[in-house]
Amino acid sequence: MLNVHDVSKCFTAGKPVFSGVSLQVERGEYIAIMGESGSGKSTLLNLIAGLDTPDAGRIEIDGRNMAELDDAARTELRRSTMGFVFQAFHLLPHLSIERNVALPLALNGRRDREADDRVQELLSAVGLIDRRGELPARLSGGEMQRVAVARALVHRPKLVLADEPTGNLDAESAADILELLRSQLKRDAAAGILVTHSSIAASTTDQIYRMTREGLRSESGHA
């Protein structure tokens, strides 16, 4: 599903963020990437998503080389194939919780009854079905994070990228979200990458990698 081959990225001044990063993630495989702040974990997710371009190396998503796609093709690939959980949520403030979650389906032309049922399913799963008509401004940071997770999963993407998805949640809510992520990925045979500082969160994945400036190092297998 994902093939990252010998990828490097530098800051504007030429100082490397990381170099020689290689990674393969198969369908149904769920991995965690850990590392110190500034080690390039979020940068790697942005490169995988095609939101930024590597200075060297190759990234393939579902057999397609990101470097060979124009902006429109990369956007289409993101919409149809990927789901994202960002640290900053990126919820649209003028849309209700329900419409924020439904957005990936709408962008892919899905507005049928099945799509609506899927939105309600995810809102129930994250405990916000009774607040579906409210705007994001009325939610706590933890509640907005749960909306972001539901939005990332709603269109059953083949690849889910989650950047600190439990960073704004209490321990109980974090455990629920981690279980939801894992169960949805496994049910849909999707690939998943979890970037986290939490060893507890990382332990819910199949494999843990440590990010350094020299690349990724495999640490251990888990669930």
Image (spheres, helix red, strand yellow):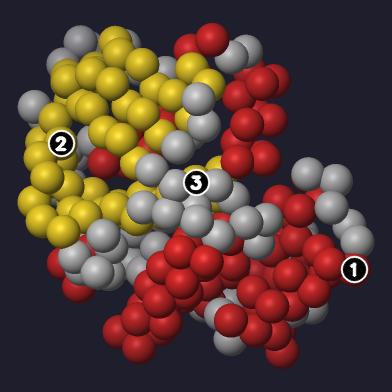
Mark 2 residue crowding within 10 angstroms, few (<14) / some (14–19) / many (20+): many
Q: Which residue is drawn at the image coordinates 52% and 72% (left, top)?
A: 146
Disc 1 to disc 2, how far (Cα)? Answer: 43 Å
Please tell me which residue lies in front, 187 or 102. 187
Q: How many marks?
A: 3
Q: Is residue 190 left or right of residue 73?
A: left
Residue that appears at 76% across and 53% down: 105
Tag of residue 113 = 1
SS of the residue under disc 2: strand
Check whether the beta carbons of the residues at disc 2 and disc 3 lie within 8 A of each other.
no
Q: Is residue 55 left or right of residue 13?
A: right
- Circle 3: residue type: Leu
Name above or below for residue 123 compared with residue 218: below
Q: Which residue is mark 3?
A: 159
Residue 77 coordinates in the image, percent (x, y) = 63, 31
Distance between mark 2 and mark 3 Cα atoms: 19 Å
Q: Quadrant of the N terminus?
A: top left
Dot 3, crowdedness within 10 Å: few (<14), some or many (≥20)?
Answer: many
- Please, what is the three-letter code of the amino acid marked with disc 1? Arg
Question: Label 1 near label 3: C-beta < 8 Å?
Answer: no
- Figure quadrant of residue 177: bottom left
Residue 220: x, y in percent? 10, 56
Between residues 112 and 99, which one lies in front from this camera angle? Answer: 112
Q: Residue at x 75, y 61 (%)?
A: 102
The residue pinned by badge 2 equals: 216
Residue 149 in view: no
> Looking at the image, do the residues carrying marks 1 and 2 touch, with CB atoms under 8 Å apart?
no
Q: Residue at x 36, y 16 (%)?
A: 58
Q: Is residue 94 left or right of residue 46?
A: right
- Residue 157 seen in the current view: yes
